[in-house]
Amino acid sequence: MMCGITGTPGTGKTSVANELARQGSPVLHLSETISGYIIEKDQERDTLIIDEEGWAGSFIPFSGFVEGHLAHLLPCDRIVVLRCRPDILIQRLKKRGYGEEKIRENALAEALDVILIETVDSFSPEQVYELDTTDKSTTECAMITDRFAKGEIQASFGAIDWSSYTGMIE
């Protein structure tokens, strides 16, 4: 069973995955698997351009949790999309030292459900769980993620609406 943990940067993917690993679950950080698929570094956007198709096509399935904002491109059995209210996401990304344009781009992507839409387009409804991390602890998010992966809680998505935040981002 491979369970993906995906979401916009800053939603808590790495923190949740690290907590799952601390609790004994096998975890693969997808950032450790992309080195051979980097096409270039986009200096203006401060991001790596990856051959996503080549990377996903050569990915060897992993039994456990796969964490990264490209996890929804992999053939996961289940996938958790972490979400965060855009105003809080902006604060988190500022603390990481992201530039203003990168912060704006990621906050807008979160407000417009970009990762969720990409995920729902690729997976059946019973495979997807949307988790709002805004006011939850890392431990609580890890517990929910683990329970969904084990089939103990039902799939759920579409209830979070950050669209009212788009005006504050643009």
Image (cartoon, rainbow, N blue to C red):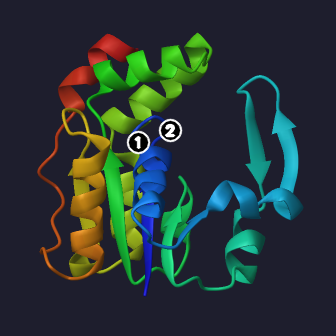
**Quick one: label 2, few (<14), some, or many (20+) residues within 10 Å?**
many
Question: Residue at horizontal 60%, vertical 85%?
Answer: 61
Location of residue 52 by image quarter? bottom right
Residue that numbered label 2 is attached to: 9
Image quarter where the C terminus lies is top left
Image quarter where the N terminus lies is bottom left
Q: Are marks 2 and 1 in contact (CB under 8 Å)?
A: no
Question: Residue at horizontal 43%, vertical 22%?
Answer: 92
Question: Residue at horizontal 59%, vertical 23%?
Answer: 102
Tell me the number on the disc at residue 12.
1
Q: Percent from the top left, x then y, of residue 112?
A: 33, 38
Question: Residue at horizontal 78%, vertical 61%?
Answer: 51
Q: Percent from the top left, x then y, of residue 47?
A: 72, 35
| Left or right of residue 109: residue 63 | right
Report the amino acid beneath label 2: Pro
| Left or right of residue 144: residue 113 | right
Give the residue at the far front of this rendering: 23
> Is 90 drawn above or below residue 37 in the view shown?
above
Tell me the number on the disc at residue 122.
none
Q: Nearer the viewer, residue 142 or 33?
A: 142
Report the amino acid beneath label 1: Gly
Tell which tag, 2 or 1, sits nearer the viewer: 1
**Circle 2 — which element?**
loop
Q: Percent from the top left, x then y, of residue 62?
A: 58, 82
